[in-house]
Image: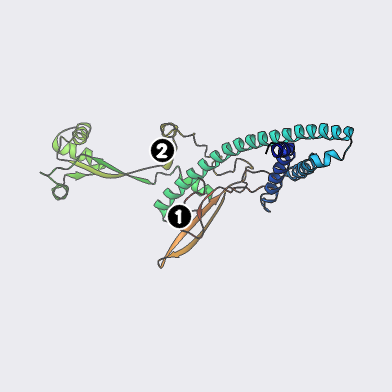
Amino acid sequence: MENLGKTLGKYVISIGLFVMGLVFLVKYFSGDALEKQPIMLLISSLILLAVAVLMTPTVLEKLSGSISRILGYGAAVLALFLGYQVYSSVDSELVYQEKKKQYDEVVIQKLKDIRSIEEAYEDVYGVFTTNFDTLLNFVHKPVVAIPFKAGTFHDSLPEERSIELGYVITRADVDSVAALIGTSADDLLSKIEFDMSVWKIRDTIYTTFFDENFTPEKRKAKKMDLVNLDSLTFSPLSGVRFDAKMSSIEVGGVKKATLEVKDPTPFGQEGARKDTLKFGSLTEPHLDGNWK
C-alpha cells in the first residue's frame, strides 16, 4: 500500500495538468457558432495535455537529466504564463461584465419609460405608434385623464341620491354654486374637501404625461434617474434610434395590435452572443420586457 501511494504520488503533477487541460478542451468545444471560446483556451488546453504527458515519470526516466531540467523549467514558465492568461481573462471578463451591467441598466430604463408612454398613448388614442417623434410630442399634450374627487358620500346621503338632488358638481361649477349659496369659491371648496358640505365634486382633469411621470420631483421621489427626452429613444452605444415595429394578431376571434421595441445595437463582445434588450412582441399580445 505504501509503495502504491508513492507510485501515485509521482503522477500527481501530470494527472493534475492532464485534468486541467481536459477541462479547458471541453470548455473550448462547448461554444457554439454565436458564442465562440477564445483560441487561447484551445492552445492552453493542448499545451497542458502535452506537458502532462512529458511530466510523467515514465517519459522523464527516458530523458537525460539536462532535458528533464529544461522541461521542468519550461513547465514552470508555462504554468506562470497560463496563470497570467487566466488572471487576465478573468479580470477582463469582470471589467466587461461591469460595463455591460451599466449599459443594460441605462437601456432597460429607457425601454421602461418608452413602454409607459406607449401605454398612455394607447389609452388615449386606442393604438400604439412606432413614430417616436409623435410619441415624444404626446408627452407634453394635456390629454392624460385624471379623476378628480373632493368630498365623500355617506349613508344618510348616498351618491345616487346626491346626484338626483344636484349636489354632485364639477370643478367648473364651484364658482356658480358658491355664489348661489352666498359664500366664496375657496370657502366652498375647502368645506367640500373636509366633508363639511352636502356638495361633492366628481370631475376629470387633464394633464400631461410629463407632469404626471417625468418631472424631476416625480423621478426623485421614485429614486429614478432624470429623463432626457432628447436621448430617450436612442441607443446609448451607437446613437441609433430604437427599432419599433407594430403588427396584429387574433386572440379569441378579436384582432389585437402588437408592438415590439428593441435596442438595435446591443452591447457585447466580438464573436460572442449579444443580448438584444426589448419589450413587447409582434406575435404575442403583451408588452413584457425580456430582461430579468
Q: Which label's residue is closer to the chain start, 1 or 2?
A: 2
- Given residues 17 and 6, the one toward you in this image is 6
- Type of amino acid at the residue the image marks with label 2: Asp
Q: How many marks?
A: 2
**Is residue 130 shown to the viewer in this render?**
no
Q: Is residue 65 left or right of residue 249?
A: right
- Given residues 30 and 66, the one toward you in this image is 66
Where is residue 180 drawn, in percent x and y? Answer: 15, 39
Real-space CA distance between mark 1 and mark 2, rounded to the nearest whole angstrom: 26 Å
- Given residues 56 and 269, the one toward you in this image is 56
Q: Up-down: is 143 above or below 226?
A: below
Q: Is residue 282 left or right of residue 5?
A: left
Label 2: how many residues lie within 10 Å, few (<14), some (14-19) or many (20+)? some
Q: Residue at x 22, y 38 (%)?
A: 175
Q: Residue at x 46, y 59 (%)?
A: 257
Q: Which residue is mark 1?
A: 286
**Is residue 187 shown to the viewer in this render?**
yes
Where is residue 244 drawn, in percent x and y? Answer: 55, 52
Q: Residue at x 47, y 51 (%)?
A: 288
Instruction: Tell which tag, 1 or 2, sits nearer the viewer.
Output: 1
Q: Secondary structure at mark 1?
A: loop
Where is residue 233 drawn, in percent x and y? Answer: 55, 44
Which quadrant: the N terminus?
Answer: top right
Q: Secondary structure at mark 2?
A: helix
- Given residues 9 and 161, the one toward you in this image is 9
- Type of amino acid at the residue the image marks with label 1: His
Where is residue 131 drawn, in percent x and y? Answer: 53, 51
Q: Which residue is mark 2?
A: 211
